[in-house]
Amino acid sequence: MGTTGAKREMDMMSDRVADRVRQMKGSGIREFFDIAQKMEGAISLGVGEPDFVTPWSIREACIFSLEKGYTSYTSNWGLLELREALSDSIYKETGVYYDPKGELLITAGVSEASDLALRAILNPGEEVILHEPSYVSYKPCTAFAGGTPVGVPTSVEDEFKVRAEQIEEKITAHTKALILSYPNNPTGAIMSRKELEEIADVVNEHDLLVISDEVYDKLTYEGTHTCFAALNGMKERTIVLNGFSKAYAMTGWRLGYAAGNKEIIEAMMKIHQYVMMCAPITAQMAAIEALRCEDEVERMVSEYNRRRRLMVNGLNTLGMSCFEPKGAFYTFPSIKSTGLTSEEFAKQLLFDEKVVVIPGSVFGACGEGFVRCSYAVSQYELKEALERIGEFLGKRR
Amino acid sequence: MGEKDEAKEKEKEILQILEGNARLNDAEIARMAGMDAAEVSELIAGLERKGIIRSYKTVINYEKAGIEVVQAVIDVKVSPERDTGYDSVAERISRFPEVKSVRLVSGEYDLSVLVAGKTMQEVAYFVAEKIAPLEQVRNTLTHFLLKTYKENGELYGEEEQGKRLAVTL
């Protein structure tokens, strides 16, 4: 094909795909990820999900529900039995009561819930403030919903916490909402109640909404997690997003939920009923059982905590300075001493030593100079990976 | 949390780690538990001294190793004694090296005894000659073990393979 042909092809492409999608930057390192996915003998610290298989009693409950013939749609809101159990569980954990009829919506994962939340609240051009480094979908989803994402860089000096005054600086007449995601992916940072209260004051003062993605809440190893909605006056302003993926090792089940005030949850339900109809009933039946499996969660959390210490200690011993992550299952060590960019580091580590890590820059520009290493891997793999990273660093000195 | 509770928590954490893998050394345990190695050594020594840690053993799948071991669970009905109840007969049975475990259980029978030997005959004779004739033993029921699916929390079947992708954000 000549250049004219290629150009014509591109023009046609641009006609067929909507502008807002075409303009969305694809991930620049997809190619690297493709290689990483297929590399034989690689140890992956690039995983964003538990290495545990869903606890057996949960799987068993799901199988039983299938045998019983639970294969239909459910209410758009989700099974009432699940919403009631969830309401109890949230109340027990956070002290915040959500009416199972109207304040809770069961979704296909937190991913769907965050998309619904953004679409339910944003008018074209309204701004959403979000701290970075952060999970990769907030910015694109904000843009798809017609909003404008406004990033706030956090730093290792602040332990990757976002400070109230940083948020305040970004507030304009168009600011509609703030996205918070603590415990944080990719840094493992958590926020104390006091620090969140300072943010709540700003939220109040500027009449903002908050989308609080708390999917890693149960994976908090030091201190206690504070649900943003539990803060004074925040229940009305906060859409809490959470789900079963991380704490119950149920990523593939795609089950999450949103909790918030009736008006907004109702608005989210409006979208949900047309695009998703309902979350899969099989996953919902399993989730009812999951809520009875606190012992399993506790067992997994203790194991993550041991690996967390092993990894942080191991990385620091290797001379990769690593701030102490207190939640989720990620470490976010600095690779600045190598003189490489985080993408170069990840690529060379993969090719030289077959260890997969995620360049921090994927999670926002301020993630440059860091890599995300997941400790949701077996202790054996963790030790082996640390040895390989040690080899890699040794050769570069 | 009081100092005593804190020590208890630390001991519990060490016990859980060791129960999962008894081959870890003190330094490794210390890193995992967020303690220092000297403290871990001291606590473990204490747990051994107090008899809380009884021994460090290995869970072995003998079938896979091709080593033949015959095991049987023996239900034993006994007449309890006036002063010692079930204890004295249970302790007597426990002393035989062929006996791997002895437990007092509820239900029709009183003791559940695990016996191991090289052949079925050896195990059967052991029961007939050593356990059944005991004065307090009224009845025995022998169940030979045919296949082990799970032992001490370890599944014997094929391990569940993770099906995760190498990269997920």
Image (tube, coloured by chain):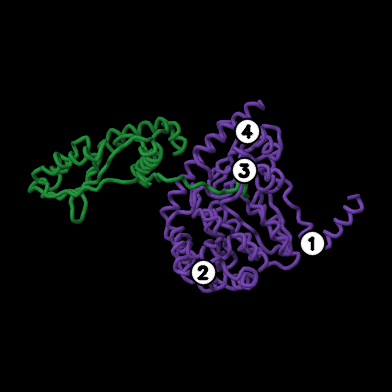
Chain colours: A purple, B green
Which amino acid type is shown beneath numbered disc 1? Val
Q: Which residue does the numbered mark 4 point to in the structure image?
A: A353
Which amino acid type is shown beneath numbered disc 3? Arg
Looking at the picture, tell me which residue is in the foreground, A222 or A173.
A222
> Is residue A29 at all visible to an observer of this figure?
yes
Nearest to N terminus: mark 2 or mark 1:
1
**Foreground label between 2 and 3:** 2
Looking at the image, do the residues carrying marks 1 and 4 touch, with CB atoms under 8 Å apart?
no
Q: Which residue does the numbered mark 3 point to in the structure image?
A: A372
Looking at the picture, tell me which residue is in the foreground, B3 or A289.
A289
Which amino acid type is shown beneath numbered disc 2? Thr
Q: Report how far apart the C-alphas of labels 2 and 3 lie in the structure.
A: 39 Å
Label 2: few (<14), some or many (≥20) within 10 Å?
A: few
**Foreground label between 2 and 1:** 2
Examine the image and state in which quarter residue A170 appears: bottom right
Residue B61: x and y in percent read 37, 39
Nearest to N terminus: mark 2 or mark 3:
2
Q: Which residue does the numbered mark 2 point to in the structure image?
A: A71
Kindly indicate whether the residues beneath marks 1 and 4 are on one polypeptide chain.
yes
Kind of element beneath mark 2: loop
In the visual, does B134 lie left or right of B157? left
